[in-house]
Amino acid sequence: MIDARELVDTKNSTQAKKIFGDQEVYEQELERIFGRCWLFLAHECMLEKTGDFITTTMAEDPVVVTRHKDGSINAFINSCSHRGNRVCTADSGNSKSFVCNYHGWVFGADGSLVDVPLAETCYHGDIDKSKLGLPKIRVESYRGFVFGCFDDDAPSLEEYLGDWGWYLDTFMVGAGEGMELIGPPMKSTLKCNWKVPAENFVGDAYHVGWTHAAALEVLGGELGMLAGNTAEIPYAQLGIQVTTRHGHGCGIIRQAASSIHVKRENYDKFNQETIPKVAEKLGEARAGLFDGHWNCTTFPSCSFLYGTNIFKVWHPRGPNEIEVWSYVLVHKGMDDATKKEVVKQAARSFGTAGTLESDDGDNMVNATSINQGTQARKNRMSSTMAHDYEGPHPEFPGIVGASFIGETSYRGFYRFYQEIMNAESWQAIHARDDEWDDMFENKDFWKNKIAGNK
Ligand code: UNU
Ligand code: FES
Ligand code: FE
């Protein structure tokens, strides 16, 4: 077992370069992170009717997710209890049952074993189907987003999200009718470690003006001014960064939701009409964030850009490879023309062949491989930006950084990474609920800043 305090130094905000490629680190992540956290599976809109199913993976384990006739959503590992072959080979569909391709065992939508060929003649009736169902994975939904968890000791999904739910509600509840995900997902493979895009989405607005400079110059829009990092910009007034108890977090650039859409009339109109509804439902603090552009990661590997509305899951495939699954987020209350506009704009920027997607892919792949050089991997990386410019905020939950460009949410992501990599159990994590934010030492940062602004 690796002591994660070597991998992450929370005091000096550094990480060992080897966290991006080391096999032993990766094996520990599979058990301690992917084996114990809530992982995104699907949206309920993909499982509306009895018998609807999708297949996905939780880390490297293939999983079937189904809508059962009692209305419940079920998930189980896509592996037959006879000799282990897949019981479902489709990406999605509607079916009463799943028949293993190898010897023909038949499973119901709740994973129960319902039929075994030659049960009377060749098993001589001596087989107890009730004991051979597919073991169920915990499934819970938050605002229609369905997650699964292998660990019975994990907190409920709502507790796991914690303060992060307050932020998610801005768009998942604020607009009134909820959100949905447009699939099937665009899929691609990247030769990178899963944490490189996860940390990028949780907290990297720093790269936007540099990595995406050429794209932003072409696009113009509200973020055009970031291109090249040369314009005089009141960075501290344009947004915030957030981290929460279990590593989830975001960066929010105010009034920039549609900034990288080329065609945006419908979406802008939707946003302006919706802001007063958000204020009424949730109050002014969140109404003020509704037309922001958000980069987000729900720990460990579910990331999205609200505004651009791409929603991504980084499925690990070894320490040096991921599958990227990209969906598009839309509001249920949008009319079809607006939904279509949003889907097109999300795909052209951050779909598999998106313009900004390919800017990022190059960085993801290189950061992974160069950090694994025989000598390089002995060194460390840093995430220290603005480490005194953050703290608890009177309006916004979690720990809040002073600008959208900072590394508060990087630090929070790796703080929790260290904690869960070392924790024996979820009980050990709960025991630290009151002290989790000790590393963010400037407790009066916002109090002083707000007093100073008055
Ligand atoms: O590349 C990103 N994560 C990004 C791009 C974030 C905000 C705006 C544009
Ligand atoms: Fe950030 Fe080099 S400047 S990785
Ligand atoms: Fe990017």
Image (spheres, grey):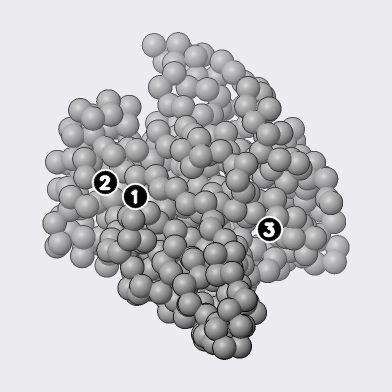
Disc 1 is placed on an element classified as loop
Tell which of 230 and 221 is nearer to you. 221
- On screen, residue 451 above or below 274: above
**Left or right, 4 with reference to 283:** right
Q: Does the residue at mark 1 contact the one at mark 3 (Cβ under 8 Å)?
A: no
Q: Which residue is mark 2?
A: 178
Looking at the image, tell me whether mark 3 or mark 2 is earlier in sequence order. Answer: 3
- On screen, residue 185 above or below 297: below
Image quarter of the C terminus: top left
Q: Does the residue at mark 2 contact the one at mark 1 (Cβ under 8 Å)?
A: yes
Task: Confirm whether residue 260 shows in the render.
Answer: no
The quarter holding residue 60 reads bottom right
| Number of residues whose C-alpha sits closer than 10 Å to that of mark 1, classed few (under 14), some (14–19) or many (20 or more) | some
- Residue occupying the point 26% across, 46% down: 178
Looking at the image, tell me whether mark 2 or mark 1 is earlier in sequence order. Answer: 1
Q: Which residue is mark 3?
A: 30
| Number of residues whose C-alpha sits closer than 10 Å to that of mark 2, classed few (under 14), some (14–19) or many (20 or more) | some
Q: Which residue is mark 1?
A: 144
- Residue occupying the point 15% across, 61% down: 336
Disc 2 is placed on an element classified as loop
Q: Amino acid at mark 2?
A: Gly
Q: CA distance from mark 2 to mark 1?
A: 8 Å
